[in-house]
């Protein structure tokens, strides 16, 4: 009986479990979870992302990815994942599956920001889990970290929901995780996850997206993400970031709209958010005061200084918007009437501008602008107020402008927008006024004098090409426009941030300054009385195009970056570590490691001998090169460093430029220029020419680059000629004893230099056309001859040193076959057959410890072959390259190579990760 009873109970339990499962699948699970119903109502910002592989690629293209991954919160999360990866031993499997990026995929991931205390804000992440394997992956990750001694994994119940807490023992920081119906909610702030649980008790309550429920942003093409903004909670959020007395104006301006939904697009050097915002309905808000007033264009461009850090531009008539501003002086009826008459001369455009602060502790200059359609009428009422006030008739003149004492505060005529307390504890300065064109400008006299000096010198936005290009991308008319220059506002921002946030801003300075130009604009609907009327909203973040290049998608080079220029690129990209390239219009471009063109300059001919000249002998260093009949030395900002450019005779054209230190601390570097006519000139970085080198003409063409060095205080120039002879000259142009020296056969290729302390210890290595490596000294002695490979009458040998002159390879080209030999090895490192004829430039990149790359460029088909230290072709196929060569660097910290090449008009950077041989 006991067995039958047990079987019956088992069957009942199974039937109950099956029934529960069927009920769950057909009732609860059949109703999909609204992910926005899991976001607490007090969210300030809600970011929704859908296509994460594309988002990451676009972040890389606009050069934000590296900056974002450098943020401390990102690095901490990456550190936890890397630790779990190493503990589970699943690094290779996770790399194959794509890791966290594969988990996110094309799911709807929601990130919300909430104010959690007067000094803190928290972030809540919501990630859906669509497969059982993903749930197991997350659970395995948490359990793996929980077993490690550095972490503690616990659980607790909160209102019938189980919360998982992962705590780092050293810092006692924790992550709280909730899995609600396969929606993973994660936050470092436990109260946010608890708020989600409380939100579950009210499933019918409006969500953060209810106001925009009719818009399905996932059906909109071309968007990288959407951002929901709760403007009503912005002042509370700003309290966390800034001192409370620093954002009063923004609190008032936020009264235009209540919430907004914006779509994000990342492209080139732009990040653009566009969408709609709902008008604020609260009584007495700024929206209620401005309703019905027309939008205005920014007419201030001719009177805004280039030192402007921020502009708050408002399409508002002060007299109509604030008919009786609080705090307006009313000591006499006559004075009050004069103020009202002055306000009646103003039009519907006003603005507040802040100038760049010299230091973080200094107060930024503040200027108030208001448009005056009839400046003469405005001036009469200003003079009337000065007389009523008893002000002196004296004034200060800056150029054609007269600065008078105002006799009233800005808020008395422009309304409460200018009354918020200043974030700097300084004594209020007397107000002054000046008419600049059709605008009345109010500020203190010191600020006005500096501002007017900029206007007189035409240092204004209208004369700034970068600002003009920026404004052309903004909306032509708006009710509210906020323009920010992050470079000019840096010190002012440091001054108003709370102490807790200032260090974070300094750590992420590069991220903040990535987009120097920012514009937020709100444009009301044509019919504001309509129930569905909304503000069109645009937030534009722009990095100015400092040169004729535009960042583009990487295309085939999915792990790289592309910069497209106006004209095709020529020559070989020089990596110094900035990349220097020249286009077919002879314009030289200086490209930063962040892939931005810092400066461009037009040269008189092809750039030759690109190299960094160190600062020696009291002279400045910079980028050295030759072009046409000139030698140039450029500073980092593109300015020519005096006494450069050095002017050579007009009949000469620089084909090669070599530099070497002088050997004495107070002496300038030596420069050796080879001309297209096979002549040599020796001079120093101060422009002093050496006797015997004016110029020195050679009987035969050079076989390769000449060598310039200093041996024990003596200048030496080694010149290999194609006829098989090597010449060595001193600083006076005289031959060293033992030279010219015969190498036994014709020469081709460069010379490997091993500098020594004496002439006898200074060694050179060349290869002749009999396939012999010849090593000799500067005293004229041949030390050795070694045959590299068999030779024939049609074979051509070249010696190819690496850029640092520490290693070399020898190439043998015979017909359509090219062999590359390492010194001391009889068998070739690699052999490559070509269909095309003509020279095939070979480059050697040797970074030590077996990290060696050989690059062979085939100009005809326009591609480059890359081989590793074992002679294996990387990628199994050549890469496109239209230049004469490529650039390659190695980062030991990340063990990655960066390949730089020209492909038509594009400069491409590609990251390579190779295993050691």
Image (cartoon, rainbow, N blue to C red):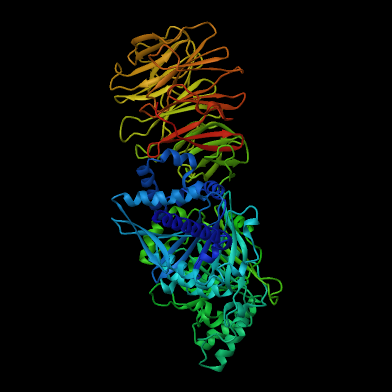
Q: Residue at x 42, y 15 (%)?
A: 766
When the figure is inspected, residue 777 is found, relative to residue 194, above or below; the finding is above
Total marks drawn? 0
Q: Quadrant of the C terminus?
A: top left
Residue furthest out toward the front: 1
**Does the image show residue 183?**
no
Above or below 457: residue 249: below
The N terminus is located in which quarter?
bottom left
Q: Choose top left, top right, bottom left or bottom right for residue 243.
A: bottom left
Answer with left or right where residue 168 lies relative to residue 345.
Answer: left
Q: Is residue 534 in sight in this rendering?
A: yes
| In-front residue for pair 178/110 | 178
Residue 834 in the image: above or below residue 391: above
Q: Position of residue 599 (x, y in %)?
A: 52, 45
Horizontal and vertical percent position of residue 6: 41, 56
Residue 213, quarter of the rendered image = bottom right
Q: Position of residue 727 (x, y in %)?
A: 41, 15
Horizontal relation, residue 138 to residue 373: left or right: left
Q: Name the residue at 59% across, 24% down.
A: 859
Does residue 877 lie above or below 268 as drawn? above
Q: Residue furthest bottom?
A: 333
Q: Which one is nearer the viewer's eye here, 673 or 213?
A: 213
- Residue 578 position, x and y percent, is 47, 40
**Viewer-closest of 256 and 754:** 256
Q: Nearer the viewer, residue 158 or 536?
A: 158
In the image, taking residue 80 as reference, residue 437 lies left or right, namely right
């Amino acid at each position: 009986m006991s067995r039958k009873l047990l079987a019956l109970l088992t069957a009942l339990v199974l039937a109950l479990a099956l029934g529960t499962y069927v009920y769950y699948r057909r009732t609860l699970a059949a109703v999909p979870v609204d992910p926005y119903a899991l976001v607490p109502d007090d969210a300030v910002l809600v970011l929704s992302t859908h296509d994460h592989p594309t988002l990451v690629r676009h972040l890389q293209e606009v050069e934000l990815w590296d900056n974002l991954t450098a943020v401390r919160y990102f690095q901490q999360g990456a550190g936890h994942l890397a630790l779990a990866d190493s503990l589970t031993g699943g690094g290779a499997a996770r790399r194959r599956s794509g890791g966290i990026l594969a988990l996110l995929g094309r799911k709807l991931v929601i990130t919300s920001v909430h104010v959690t205390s007067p000094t803190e804000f928290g972030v809540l992440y919501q990630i859906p889990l669509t497969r059982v394997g993903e749930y197991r992956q997350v659970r395995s990750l948490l359990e793996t970290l929980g077993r490690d001694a550095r972490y503690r994994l616990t659980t607790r119940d909160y209102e019938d929901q189980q919360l998982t807490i992962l705590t780092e023992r050293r810092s006692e920081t924790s992550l709280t995780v909730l899995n609600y119906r396969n929606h993973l909610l994660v936050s470092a702030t436990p109260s946010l996850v608890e708020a989600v649980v409380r939100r579950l008790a009210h499933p019918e309550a409006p969500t953060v997206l209810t106001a925009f429920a009719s818009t399905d942003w996932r059906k909109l093409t071309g968007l990288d993400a959407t951002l929901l903004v709760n403007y009503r909670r912005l002042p509370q959020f700003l309290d966390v970031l800034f001192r409370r007395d620093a954002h009063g104006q923004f609190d008032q301006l936020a009264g235009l709209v209540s919430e907004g939904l914006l779509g994000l697009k990342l492209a080139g050097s732009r990040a653009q958010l566009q969408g709609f915002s709902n008008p604020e309905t609260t009584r007495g808000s700024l929206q209620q005061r401005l309703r019905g007033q027309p939008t205005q264009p920014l007419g201030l461009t001719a009177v805004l200084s280039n030192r402007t850090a921020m502009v708050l531009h408002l399409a508002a008539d002060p007299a109509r918007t604030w008919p009786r501003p609080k705090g307006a002086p009313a000591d006499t009826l006559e004075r009050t009437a004069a103020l009202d008459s002055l306000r009646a001369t103003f039009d519907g455009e006003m603005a507040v501008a802040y100038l760049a602060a010299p230091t973080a502790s200094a107060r930024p200059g503040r200027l108030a602008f208001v448009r005056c359609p009839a400046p003469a009428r405005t001036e009469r009422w200003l003079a009337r107020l000065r007389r009523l006030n008893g002000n002196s008739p004296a004034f200060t003149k800056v150029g054609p402008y007269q600065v008078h004492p105002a006799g009233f505060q800005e808020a008395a005529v422009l309304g409460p927008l200018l009354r918020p307390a200043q974030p700097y504890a300084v004594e209020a300065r007397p107000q002054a006024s000046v008419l600049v064109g059709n605008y009345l400008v109010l500020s203190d006299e010191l600020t006005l004098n500096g501002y007017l000096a900029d206007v007189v010198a035409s240092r204004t936005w209208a004369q700034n090409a970068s600002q003009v290009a920026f404004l052309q991308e903004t909306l032509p008319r708006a009710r509210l426009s906020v323009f920010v220059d992050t470079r000019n506002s840096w010190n002012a921002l440091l001054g108003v941030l709370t102490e807790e946030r200032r260090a974070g801003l300094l750590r992420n300075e590069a991220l903040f300054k990535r987009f120097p130009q920012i514009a937020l604009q709100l444009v009301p609907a044509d019919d504001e009385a309509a129930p569905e009327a909304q503000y069109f909203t645009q937030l534009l973040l722009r990095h100015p195009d400092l040169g004729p290049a535009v960042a583009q998608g990487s295309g085939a080079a999915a792990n790289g970056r592309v910069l497209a220029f106006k004209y095709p690129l020529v020559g070989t990209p020089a990596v110094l570590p900035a990349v220097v390239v020249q286009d077919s219009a002879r314009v030289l471009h200086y490209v930063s490691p962040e892939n931005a063109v810092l400066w461009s300059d037009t040269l008189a001919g092809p750039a030759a001998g690109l190299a960094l000249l160190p600062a020696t002998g009291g002279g400045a260093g910079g980028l050295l090169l030759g072009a046409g009949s000139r030698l140039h030395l450029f500073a980092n900002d593109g300015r020519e460093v005096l006494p450069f450019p050095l002017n050579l005779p007009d009949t000469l054209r620089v084909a090669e430029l070599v530099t070497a230190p002088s050997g004495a601390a107070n002496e300038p570097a030596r420069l050796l220029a080879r001309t297209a006519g096979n002549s040599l000139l020796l001079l120093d970085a101060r422009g002093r020419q050496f006797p015997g080198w004016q110029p020195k003409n050679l009987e035969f063409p050079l076989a390769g680059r000449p060598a310039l060095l200093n041996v024990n205080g003596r200048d030496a120039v080694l010149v290999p000629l194609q006829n098989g002879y090597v010449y060595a000259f001193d600083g006076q142009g005289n031959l060293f004893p033992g030279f010219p020296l015969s190498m036994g056969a014709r020469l081709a290729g460069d010379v490997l230099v091993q500098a020594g302390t004496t002439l006898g210890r200074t060694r050179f290595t060349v290869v002749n056309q009999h396939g012999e490596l010849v090593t000799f000294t500067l005293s004229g002695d041949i030390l050795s001859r070694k045959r590299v490979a068999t030779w024939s009458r049609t074979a051509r040998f070249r010696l190819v040193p690496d850029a640092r002159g520490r290693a070399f390879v020898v190439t043998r080209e015979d017909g359509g076959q090219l062999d590359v030999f390492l010194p001391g090895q009889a068998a070739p490192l690699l052999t490559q057959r070509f269909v095309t004829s003509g020279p095939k430039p070979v480059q050697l990149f040797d970074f030590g410890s077996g990290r060696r790359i050989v690059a062979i460029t085939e100009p005809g088909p326009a591609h480059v072959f890359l081989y590793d230290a074992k002679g294996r072709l990387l990628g199994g196929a050549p890469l496109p390259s239209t230049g004469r060569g490529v650039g390659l660097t190695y980062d030991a910290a990340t063990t990655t190579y960066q390949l730089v090449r020209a492909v038509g008009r594009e400069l491409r950077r590609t990251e390579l990760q190779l295993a050691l041989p």
